[in-house]
Image (cartoon, rainbow, N blue to C red):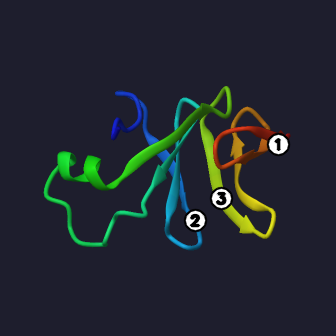
Amino acid sequence: MFTGHKLGESVVALAVQPANLSMATADSAGFIKVWDLSAFTGSPLSDSREAAALIRQTAVWRAHKAVVTSVQWVSNKHGEFVLTSSLDHQVAMWSASGALLGL
């Protein structure tokens, strides 16, 4: 479902997986959302319904208690990871599905 971030919250950072198959977005409330981009062809989208058919949310989690300041996507032989930092003074490493791997 293409729901975006909550009304009143701003997307403050994003990172695209190196193969361009997924994207992580971070918002001002501390949430991370992961999106599947594999069906997106790069052609312009006419409206949000078209986007919903091509860009699918696959995970969402509360990463921090304050605004996220940075998000990075790391792909390596061990898997897909999302690194985040925040104004809550923490840096965290997550699986691409939202499991906390370390602070």
Tag 3: amino acid = Gln
Dot 2 alpha-carbon crowd within 10 angstroms: few under 14, some 14 to 19, many 20 or more? some
Element under disc 2: loop
Q: Position of residue 37 (x, y in %)?
A: 42, 60
Q: Residue at x 35, y 38 (%)?
A: 1
Closer to the chain start, of discs 1 and 2, is 2
Q: Position of residue 97 (x, y in %)?
A: 64, 43
Between the residue at mark 2 and the residue at mark 3, the CA separation in whole angstroms equals 9 Å
Element under disc 3: strand
Tag 2: amino acid = Gln
Q: Position of residue 12 (x, y in %)?
A: 50, 46
Q: Residue 46's image quarter?
A: bottom left
**Callout in the foreground (3, 1):** 1
Q: Residue at x 70, y 66 (%)?
A: 75
Q: In the figure, is residue 25 to the left or right of 84?
A: left
Q: Which residue is mark 1?
A: 101
Q: Residue at x 69, y 40 (%)?
A: 86
Q: Residue furthest left?
A: 46
Between the residue at mark 1 and the residue at mark 2, the CA separation in whole angstroms equals 18 Å
Dot 3 alpha-carbon crowd within 10 angstroms: few under 14, some 14 to 19, many 20 or more? some
Q: Quadrant of the C terminus?
A: top right
Dot 1 alpha-carbon crowd within 10 angstroms: few under 14, some 14 to 19, many 20 or more? few
Q: Position of residue 63 (x, y in %)?
A: 67, 34
The label shown at residue 17 is 2
Q: Residue 66's image quarter?
A: top right
Q: Which residue is mark 3?
A: 72
Tag 1: amino acid = Leu
